[in-house]
Image (cartoon, helix red, strand yellow):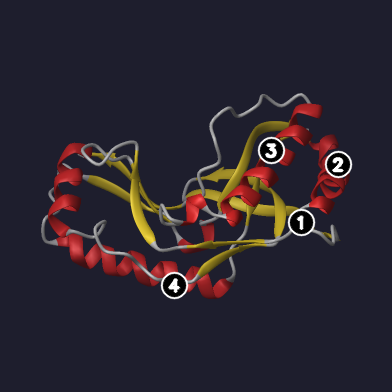
Amino acid sequence: MMIRAFLAIELAEGLRQELARLQQDLKQRLARDLSRDMRISWVQPPAIHLTMKFLGDIDEQLVLPMQEAIGRALREHRSVQIPLEQIGVFPRAQQPRVLWVGPSEGWKQGGDERRLGSLHQSLEGCCRSFDFAPENRPMSPHLTLARIKAGERRFGEVLAKSGVMDRGVSLGTLAVESIALMKSELKPTGSVYTRLWEVKLDASEFRS
């Protein structure tokens, strides 16, 4: 049986609540200038996570072997703290399609950023051993707040006018302490994610 899956870092409940408050604040700040030609899909806080590796459709028989392999790989890695202090967009400010929150540019020059990159490379190595295609882009830690489905250019203008990306935010930190294999099921109401297993960093303890 095939399942759609990805490797991710799950969020603590307190952080999800902070993200929900941030989303509500952004909605209020932007509402006055939004127009009908813009279509924005806000990610529900329970569905927000940090994706480490999208796997796509995988054979269910790989679930346990991958748990064991990734458990071994993570024994050499310590936990990482990612401060959530900046709002940004992909791919560019003039025509954004994704609104996110993540670390500042300063964090990206430090040791935690290097440790996260090393962890990402270890996961990629494990996935290659199971014949998954490599991801050549560097790790970009961010949490998606919303996706802009239509009216991207106009939404970019609204964002620029609001100044929300010019001010820092303070949501605390995303603690990278374990890696989870998540199953994704597409429902009429949106994607539903189910954790299949979790491997903790450095201790490499398994939890289902």
Sequence-wise, the earlier of marks 3 and 2 is: 2
The residue lying toward the viewer, choosing from 186 and 84, is 84
| 133 to 74, vertically: above or below | above
Separation (CA) of disc 3 from disc 4: 30 Å
> Quadrant of the image for the C terminus?
bottom right
Separation (CA) of disc 3 from disc 2: 14 Å
Sequence-wise, the earlier of marks 1 and 2 is: 2
Disc 1, SS = strand
Disc 2, SS = helix
- Identify the residue shown where x is 54% and y is 54%: 110
**Amino acid at pointer 4:** Glu
Sequence-wise, the earlier of marks 4 and 2 is: 4
> Is residue 181 something one can see in this rendering?
yes
Q: Which residue corresponds to mark 2?
A: 69
Q: Which residue corresponds to mark 1?
A: 198
Separation (CA) of disc 3 from disc 1: 18 Å
**Amino acid at pointer 2:** Ala
| 118 to 128, vertically: above or below | below
